[in-house]
Amino acid sequence: MEKGELQKLLKNLEGEQKRLKGELGLIADENPEIKGDYKAHFHKPDSSDTADEKAQSVTEYERERAMEQDMEQRLKEVTETIEKIKKGEYGVCANCSTTIQPKRLEAIPTARLCINCAEKASLI
C-alpha cells in the first residue's frame, strides 16, 4: 500500500476509533482494571417502578450490553490496526506472515489474516 493511502487509512481509522469511544461512553463505562474493556450501564429500577418498568430496564440493559460488546470488539480491531500501521507491520498475516492481498485490505482494512489463513480458520 502506498504511503499516501496508508496515511489516509490511518486518519480514517483514528476517526472511527474516536467515534467508537464516544458512542461507548454513552452506554458504558471503561473498566479501570482491564484496558479496553467496558461495562454497559445498568439503570437500576426505582422501588416505585411497576413490573413492566423493571422488565423494560432489564431489556434496555441487555440491548446496550449487546451494542457495547459489538463496539468494544470493533474498537479493539481498529486500535490493533492503528498500532500495526504505526509500527510498519500493517498488511502482514498474523498467522503465516505473508503479505495480505491489497484487495482484501481494501475490503476489510482491519483484516489480520490473508485469505488462505482466513479460509483455513473458517472465517470466510
Image (cartoon, helix red, strand yellow):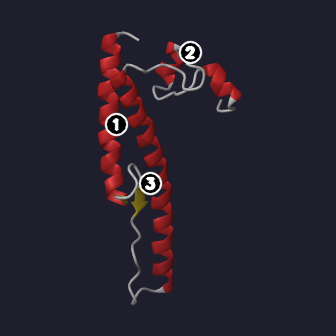
Residue sitting at 48 percent across and 52 percent down?
69
Which is nearer the eye, 113 or 23? 113
For marks 1 and 2 on the same chain, the one whose residue lies earlier in the sequence: 1
Count neighbours of disc 1 (C-alpha within 10 A) and say few if under 14, some if 14 to 19, many if 20 or more: some
Compared to residue 67, the image places residue 50 above or below, namely below
Q: Residue at x 62, y 21 (%)?
A: 115
Q: For residue 16, which numbered disc appears in the image?
A: 1
Residue 121: image tag: none
Q: Which residue is mark 2?
A: 98
Q: Residue furthest bottom?
A: 48
Name above or below for residue 124 compared with residue 6. below
Residue 8 x, y percent position in the rendering? 31, 20
Query: Closer to the camera: disc 1 or disc 2?
Result: 2
For the residue marked with disc 3, what is the amino acid? Glu
Alpha-carbon span between mark 1 and mark 2: 27 Å
Identified at 68% across, 26% down, the residue is 119
Q: Amino acid at mark 1?
A: Glu
Asked if 115 appears above or below 34 in the picture, the reply is above
Q: Give the secondary structure at mark 1.
A: helix
The answer to which of marks 1 and 3 sits earlier in the sequence is 1
Name the spot of residue 103 as percent of width and height, x first. 52, 15
